[in-house]
């Protein structure tokens, strides 16, 4: 978490910090779901390792450990928060993305279309647009319905991205996408907003380690 802990996650079971080599999670035991997942992406994480596809409970979760069965016949995908393809330089890193703590129930069109397209774009920020690194935080928002053993289905899925080039933060991307089939045949760009807006919706403070003036400017912009 190079630029801060968005919710001051720690030992609280509804804001429980799980630190892995591949990403960091704030986990919510009341929702059986992450509040957010934070990770860094640069060229060293990208390769050609095949998807592990070994969905499994996370032993680091201090409460009920969600299993793949909780999603069975629910109509929702086991949607990655930190993507498999952001960690495909080696088998261990890729396998870690299949812990169920890194999943959220996503509507098929959210997971397979707009969310996936943004995941592809964040990698292009490294491979095509010359950024040294991108720092990403993403997670679910809202929801009262559940699947399986009390796994909350979010109303929307959000993501904030900080791109860094030449050692300096350059721009931010923020989206909040409805978690339903209304997103079918749309673009992730249709859901662009500001980091400030995502902070207002979630109550989190992103990129708090940036100098205040830079943070204020970057977080108020809608990505073009």
Image (cartoon, grey):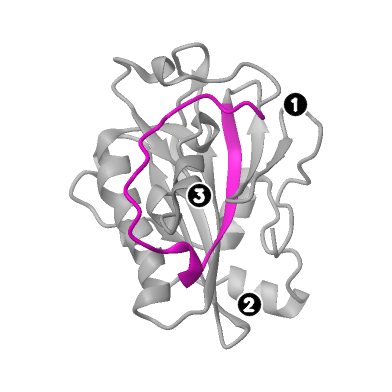
Q: Do the residues labelled 2 and 1 touch (CB within 8 Å)?
A: no
Tell me where the magenta segment starts and ends, as one range. Answer: 33-60
Q: Is residue 136 left or right of residue 209?
A: left
N-term-proximal mark, 2 vs 3? 3
Q: How crowded is mark 1: few (under 14 residues within 10 Å), some or many (20 or more)?
A: some
Q: Which residue is drawn at 76% across and 74% down?
A: 212
Total number of numbered discs in the rendering: 3
Is any part of residue 19 visible from this angle?
yes
Whole-number angstrom distance, CA of label 2 to CA of label 1: 34 Å
Q: In this view, does 8 lie to the left or right of 32?
A: right
Residue in the foreground of this view, choosing between 136 and 54: 54
Q: Quadrant of the N terminus?
A: bottom right
Of the numbered discs in the image, which one, if any, rests on residue 93? 3
The vertical placement of 43 against 65, above or below, is below
Circle 2 sits on which residue? 217
Q: In this view, does 168 lie to the left or right of 150?
A: right
Residue in the foreground of this view, choosing between 78 and 206: 78
Q: Are marks 3 and 1 in contact (CB under 8 Å)?
A: no
The vertical placement of 186 against 153, above or below, is below
Q: Residues within 10 Å of mark 2 (few under 14, many from 20)?
A: few
Of the numbered discs in the image, which one, if any, rests on residue 13? 1
Choose mark 2 or mark 3, whichever is in front.
3
Label 2: element kind: helix
Q: Is 53 one of the magenta-colored residues?
A: yes
Q: Residue 80: which quarter of the image? A: top left
N-term-proximal mark, 2 vs 1? 1
Label 1: element kind: loop
Q: Residues within 10 Å of mark 3 (few under 14, many from 20)?
A: many
């Amino acid at each position: 978490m190079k630029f801060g802990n968005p919710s001051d996650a720690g030992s609280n079971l509804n804001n429980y910090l799980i630190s892995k080599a591949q990403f960091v999670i704030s986990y919510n035991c009341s929702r059986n779901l992450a509040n957010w997942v934070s990770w860094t992406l640069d060229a060293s994480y990208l390769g050609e390792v095949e998807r592990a596809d070994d969905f499994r409970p996370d032993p680091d979760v201090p409460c009920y450990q969600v299993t793949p069965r909780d999603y069975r016949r629910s109509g929702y995908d086991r949607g990655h928060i930190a993507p498999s393809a952001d960690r495909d330089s080696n088998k261990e890193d890729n396998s870690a993305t299949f812990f169920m703590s890194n999943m959220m129930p996503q509507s098929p069109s959210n997971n397979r279309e707009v969310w996936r397209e943004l995941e592809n774009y964040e990698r292009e920020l490294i491979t095509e647009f010359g950024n040294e690194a991108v720092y990403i935080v993403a997670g679910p928002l809202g929801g009262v319905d559940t699947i399986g053993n009390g796994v909350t289905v979010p109303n929307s899925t959000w993501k904030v991205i900080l791109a860094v080039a030449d050692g300096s933060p350059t721009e931010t991307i923020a989206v909040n996408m409805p978690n339903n089939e209304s997103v079918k045949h749309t673009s992730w760009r249709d859901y662009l907003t500001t980091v400030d807006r995502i902070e207002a919706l979630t109550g989190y403070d992103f990129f708090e380690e940036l100098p205040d003036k830079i943070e204020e400017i970057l977080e108020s912009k809608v990505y073009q």
